[in-house]
Image (tube, grey):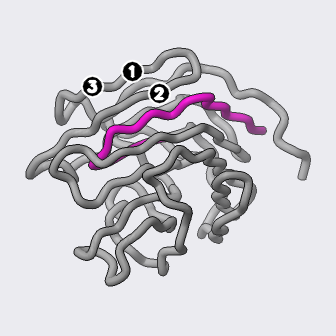
Amino acid sequence: MPALDRDVGGTFTVFGRRWATFPASVDDRTLTITTPTGANAFDHLWGFYLPVEVCSTTVEFDAQVQAADGMGDYGIGIAPRSSLVGDQPTGYSVQYEWEGSDINADPGTYVRPSGLPARAWAIEVDPAPAPDLRQRRHVKVSALGTALTIGIDGRDVAQYELPQADCGGVTIRSWGARASFSNVCVTGL
């Protein structure tokens, strides 16, 4: 398979505002968001969508993530081949998240795959330990064929085998957090 070398281009748009008002901005290659909090914080997905059609994709950015006030579990998710249906993303993603004791007996930062939208909160694969999400990190997610790989700070942390290889756009999302994604770069075939 040829290397990913084509800058996909395009502009990210915000999704989730059909369900709640929240601060989010797209500025060149920087995305910032403060996701909704409160009782309905996990009822919907919040983030950014790049409407392109790619089948092999790499998404890279520098992430700065901080729990929003009053939130325990928080994180970011990247779906390198997704669709936006009714203001909610669909597709396979990898989540990089802080899991508290309500989710994990050993609280900390983990990565795991998820299906969007309905399977975003279901843990079907044991989460893999990951570098502390509370520090600035360089994140790289690649989808090649049925493989979905996440690298953090230049080191591959986990690879997952997906049931199928889809084509689609790119979703970067967040929950329970104030997050900034800078130096965003999307390449693909």
Q: Check if residue 188 falls in the magenta segment.
A: yes
Check disc 1 and report the residue beneath it.
25
- Mark 3, other Cα within 10 Å: few <14 / some 14–19 / many ≥20: few
Disc 3 is placed on an element classified as loop
Check disc 3 and report the residue beneath it.
23
Residue with the most extreme top position: 28
Q: Earlier in the sequence, mark 2 or mark 1?
A: 1
- Mark 2, other Cα within 10 Å: few <14 / some 14–19 / many ≥20: many
Q: Amino acid at mark 3?
A: Pro
Q: Position of residue 76 (x, y in %)?
A: 43, 49
- Alpha carbon of mark 1 to alpha carbon of mark 3: how far? 7 Å
The image quarter in which residue 37 lies = top left
Q: Position of residue 174 (x, y in %)?
A: 37, 45
The image quarter in which residue 188 lies = top right
Q: Position of residue 24 (x, y in %)?
A: 34, 25
Q: Is residue 188 left or right of residue 26?
A: right
Q: Check if residue 100 falls in the magenta segment.
A: no
Q: Amino acid at mark 2?
A: Leu
Q: Main secondary structure of the magenta part?
A: strand
Q: Earlier in the sequence, mark 3 or mark 2?
A: 3
Disc 2 is placed on an element classified as strand
Magenta span covers which residues?
Answer: 172-189
Disc 1 is placed on an element classified as strand
Q: Nearer the viewer, residue 48 or 88?
A: 48
- Alpha carbon of mark 2 to alpha carbon of mark 1: how far? 6 Å
Q: Nearer the viewer, residue 95 or 166?
A: 95
Q: Are marks 2 and 1 in contact (CB under 8 Å)?
A: yes
- Mark 1, other Cα within 10 Å: few <14 / some 14–19 / many ≥20: some
Q: Amino acid at mark 1?
A: Ser
Check disc 2 and report the residue beneath it.
31
Q: Quadrant of the C terminus?
A: top right
